[in-house]
Each structure stands twice: as C-alpha cells, then as structure tokens.
Amino acid sequence: MKYFLSLVTLLTAISAQAQNNTPQNIEVNNNQLPKSNNWTYFTGRYDVNVNTGDQQIPATLNLRMKRDSIVWFSVSANMGIQIQVAKGIMLRDTLHIADIYHKEYYAIPVANASQYLSIPLGVQQLQNLFVGQPLIDTFSAKPFNNSNYSAKLVDQLMCYTTISQPLIIESKFAQPNAETKKENEGYSQLRFTEISTPNKPKDKAILEHNQWLDVSSESAGAFSFLPMGIKISSTTAQQTAQVDLTLTTARYDVIPSYPFKIDDSYKRKNLSQK
C-alpha cells in the first residue's frame, strides 16, 4: 500500500532550484498565480515509468477528472501484457484506493491523507498536477492554511514562493511569450515546483512540467496548453524515487461514469501510523 501512497505523494509536486542571482522582487496582485483554462472534464492515458533506484517499473495510468469534484484512476503494470494492479477515486472528502493484487481496500479521509503525506492533498491539488497548475490555488477565497505568498524573477523564470507551515512550496513559471500571449496576456507555463520543509532539508518533492502543447483546437477551448510530460521525484535521507509520465491520449468531452466497486473479496485496511 505504501507504494501507492508514495506514488500519490510523488504525484503531488518539481525540480532543481535555479541559481539565485540577485532576484528581483515582484508584487503579487491579489495573491493570484498565473492561470488560464476553462476545462470541466479531462480523460488522459499516460505511459509511466517508476524508478526506485534498484528497479524500474513500467506502467500505464488511466485518468478521468471532473473539475473540483472527482479524480478517478487505474494503474496497470506492463508485464508483457497489461495487468491492472490498482484503482482509485478521490472525491472532495475521501480517497478510495483498491490494491487489486493484494485484494486490499482503503478509504482515507482527505484530511488524514494530507497529514500522513505531509503535503496539501485534495481533489484540486491532484487535478492541478495533471493540468499544469500550481498546487496551491490562490484564486480560491480561502488559500491552504492561510498561506503567505511572494514572487521574484530568478534566471528568467517567475518564482512564486508559498509558505504553508511546515512547507515551503516554490513554483517557477516561464514568462509569457508571443505564443502564450495570443491566448492570455498574463498566461505563463509552469515549469518547476519544489516542496521542502526547513526541519528536514534532505527531504524534497520535485515536479517538472514540460513539452507544453497547444491543444486549444482539439479541446474546443477547454485548455490553451497542456504539459505532455511530467517528471516527479521524491528525495529523503533514505531513498530517491522518480516517476516519469507521458501523456499519450486525451479527451475533453463529458465523462459518463467513474466505475469503482469493491466486493466482499477485498479486505478493509487502515493506514499504518507514520
């Protein structure tokens, strides 16, 4: 089970700190980060490679999302043939995960999952990961844990720093260019996010969004651009792991169902204590 929670952990945050060359401080108007999309539904299929240092695990992730409401997923391992090994659904208050291989089932309150993983975790944060938006949505009326925000220009990237105790979250954006300004004057693409905590300097979660593609035509304006590649790494004093995701197919129409059924053959389990 911890493998799946580790995957969720890795699926919640971005990469290498840029050199801090006399950064220029920039006012953050209304505490709002760059954001531009109008999506309601998203269906995606990703090729996945999990590298834990001593082994590499190829897999496939199928994803269905309804904005601010549902994240549904299934994970299949590539063992010559596709074998479904896990499935899950996150609603606003509960994360349901089925470990199909071991016939185990977990129903985890989102608040408990956030505490267990020591990161902000919810439907919005998980969805933002896949659509290339910052984890902390400062367009919300109530930011996570009354976070404080600052912004500066570092090595041609816009660096937004969020202090949400006990976490420091840095989101680095490319500055708007001629192509992105056609869609939205203030739009810029998220490139790196780093989550760290001062009392554990060796522990970091790093996420990189890359290969941004203009999908405005095929998505009928639901998205301007989407990241085709997502690289997620987690580093602790004990181990380093990395997950690479490549979007292979995407749809943007209404999703008719989010199938998740647990029968009597599954054993109900609880999270172990940290």
Image (spheres, rainbow, N blue to C red):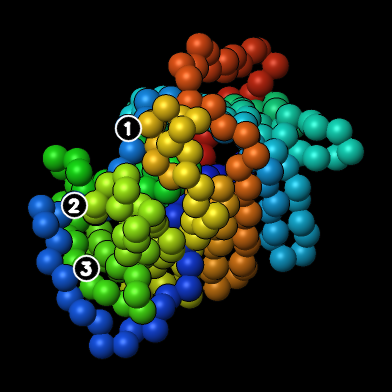
Disc marking residue 32: 2
**Residue drawn at x 39%, y 41% as measured from the top left:** 224
Residue 197: percent from the left, percent from the top? Answer: 36, 68
**Residue drawn at x 72%, y 34% as measured from the top left:** 76
Residue 89: percent from the left, percent from the top? Answer: 50, 27
Instruction: Say whether disc 1 or disc 2 marks the residue closer to the N-terminus.
Output: 2
Q: Amino acid at mark 3?
A: Ala
Q: Quadrant of residue 148?
A: bottom left
Q: Nearer the viewer, residue 135 or 39?
A: 39
Relative horizontal placement of residue 38, taking residue 268 as reference (left or right):
left
Location of residue 168 with respect to 131 vertically, above or below: below
Asked if residue 175 can be seen in this view, the reply is yes
Q: Nearer the viewer, mark 1 or mark 2?
A: 1
Location of residue 163 with respect to 17 vertically, above or below: above
Q: Counting other residues with Cα less than 10 Å from the Cα at mark 3, is it few (<14), some (14-19), or many (20 or more)?
A: many
Q: Quadrant of residue 221?
A: top left
Q: Which residue is disc 3 drawn over?
A: 151
